[in-house]
Image: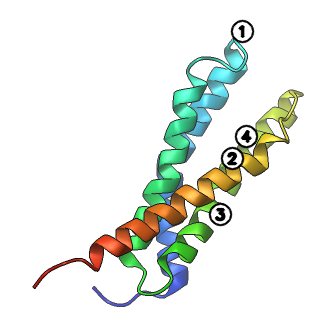
């Protein structure tokens, strides 16, 4: 596999993270919009799928990054969760719903840590191969 630059590695990781997270986030937004429950029982497992998407993106970065996989994984998680959160904030703002601003930094930190941790773990596994 040819050596890829950090931007290509991060772009691939963000793409995978969003491919997993955005459908789940959109479904969670639909469930939240139509549910009488607050926030709806299905929203919690869907939030876990969104976070799993961040870990999947970080894992891809860990496989492809030649240097600083944890840092690139953290960047991947930050960019991907920013997109997901922007979609959620926009939907709630348009609907006139309250936005839970206090959860934004906490979710961001969790997403960044998951992506960075997955990238570091995958990179370390790749280094353990035997001849």
Using the numbered discs, state the Cα–Cα distance from disc 2 to disc 3 in whole angstroms. Answer: 13 Å
Which residue in the structure is indicated by mark 1?
Answer: 36
Label 1: state its secondary structure: loop
- Residue bearing the label numbered 3: 79
At numbered mark 3, what does the secondary structure look like: helix, strand or loop? helix
Residue indicated by mark 2: 107
Query: Is the residue under label 3 in contact with that under label 2 (CB below 8 Å)?
Result: no
**Foreground disc of the pair 2, 3:** 2
Name the front one of labels 1 and 2: 2
Q: CA distance from mark 4 to mark 3?
A: 15 Å
Secondary structure beneath disc 4?
helix
Mark 4 or mark 1: name the one nearer the start of the chain.
Answer: 1
Can you tell which quarter of the image residue 72 is in? bottom right
Instruction: Of the two numbered discs 1 and 3 on the same chain, state the one appearing first in sequence.
Output: 1
At a point 64% along the width and 26% down the height, the residue shown is: 30
Residue 121: % across, % down: 39, 66
Q: How far separated are the C-alphas under marks 4 and 1? A: 18 Å
Among numbered discs 1 and 2, the one appearing first in the sequence: 1
Q: Residues within 10 Å of mark 2 (few under 14, many from 20)?
A: some
Are the two marked residues, 4 and 3, in contact with CB atoms closer than 8 angstroms? no
Residue 104, given in percent of the width and then of the height, sits at 77, 46
Q: What is the number of the mark on residue 45?
A: none
Instruction: Write the residue at 13% across / 81% down.
Output: 130
Residue 111 vs 127, above or below: the answer is: above
Q: Nearer the viewer, residue 60 or 131?
A: 131
Disc number lying in front (2 or 4) = 2
* Residue drawn at 66 percent across, 48 percent down: 84
The quadrant in which the C terminus is found is bottom left
Tag 4 residue: 88
């Amino acid at each position: 596999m040819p050596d890829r630059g950090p931007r290509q590695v991060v772009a691939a990781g963000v793409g995978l993270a969003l491919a997993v997270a955005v459908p789940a986030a959109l479904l969670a937004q639909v469930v939240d919009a139509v549910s009488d429950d607050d926030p709806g029982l299905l929203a919690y497992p869907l939030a876990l799928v969104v976070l799993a998407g961040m870990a999947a993106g970080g894992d891809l970065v860990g496989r492809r990054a030649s240097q600083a996989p944890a840092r690139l994984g953290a960047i991947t998680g930050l960019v991907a969760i920013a997109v997901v959160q922007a979609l959620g904030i926009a939907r709630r703002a348009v609907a006139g719903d309250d936005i839970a601003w206090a959860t934004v930094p906490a979710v961001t930190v969790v997403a960044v840590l998951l992506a960075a941790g997955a990238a570091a773990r995958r990179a370390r596994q790749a280094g353990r191969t035997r001849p």
